[in-house]
Image (cartoon, grey):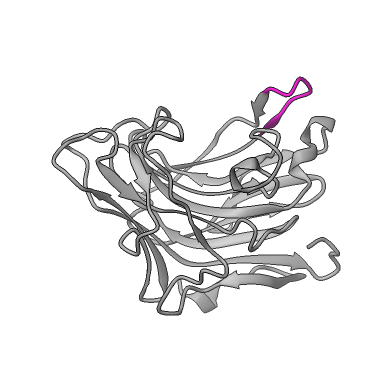
Amino acid sequence: MQKESYDAGLDWKLHWSDEFEGEQLDESIWNRQVVEAGRFNEEWQRYTDSSKNAYLENGSLVIKAIHESAQHGPDQYTSARLNTANKFTFKYGKLAARIKLPYSKGIWPAFWMLGSDINENGGDTPWPQSGEIDILELYGTKSDAVIEANIHYADSSGSHTQMGAIEYELENGKFADNFHIFELVWDEEQISWLVDGEQFASTPITSDEMTELHKEYFLLFNIAVGGKWAGRPDTTSVFPQFMYVDWVRVYKKENSSAL
């Protein structure tokens, strides 16, 4: 499946994209987060701003998770977490990306979004009130052939709640074998998730508790290593691991006024 073969469908017009065809990551779009090991979810990697961990190659963005020692434990791995905070945000539309995912025990790649007002990136709203939309997460400790979709937000008491992870499993092989197209369709009424054109999850977002799902969001790509949700790598784990993003695009309906 090549770049030119993707069809967003009738009435969808390209609003924004990064095709990753240059020589260097476009830093007018992407931020390289620098985060110490353990800050999020007891993860073992540290996120760096090094071009060793995120770079462009052969028309794709590459995120590389590296095991830097013979030890398995906190701060023995480096990786990248890229986001478009304060540079590109959107509300409603179709988000699509062509991605080849990593694999192996302890690997946790994700393509996701956070509300643009989150205090982690200079806003004034803490998580989960900021909202989170997970287009895909893969837990290598569980299965390299399964991705999960989810949303996170605050309930009427301000406590964290979620849709609950919904899985999509490949019929054959693992997600690291080939590129796949992951899509999110988001409007005032619902959010739906698709893999290679097949819808596998959908949820209404009209509840009064879901106001944070009706505002601007920014994009994130990352590979985490370990973490309390992902399991830990061990001597059977394979490193380095790579996440390849061929392109990422946002489409709007022809008659849509939402930006």
Image location (x, y in percent) of residue 61: 42, 66
Q: Place residue 53 in its image quadrant.
A: bottom left
Instruction: Identify the residue at image location x=39%, y=33%.
Output: 38
Q: Is residue 23 visible?
A: yes
Q: Is residue 205 visible?
A: no
Task: Give 97 or 84, whichever is nearer the viewer.
Answer: 84
Instruction: Identify the residue at image location x=81%, y=45%.
Output: 189
Image location (x, y in percent) of residue 242: 32, 56
Task: Give 18 or 204, whichever is nearer the viewer.
Answer: 18
Figure check: 10 above or below 124: below
Figure check: 26 above or below 65: below
Task: Give 147 or 113, whichever is nearer the viewer.
Answer: 113
Q: Main secondary structure of the magenta part?
A: loop
Figure check: 9 above or below 233: below
The residue positioned farthest toward the top in the image shown:
157
Task: Give 201 or 68, whichever is nearer the viewer.
Answer: 68
Read off the magenta span.
Answer: 153-159
Residue 107 lies within the magenta run: no
Residue 157 lies within the magenta run: yes
Quadrant the C terminus occupies? bottom right
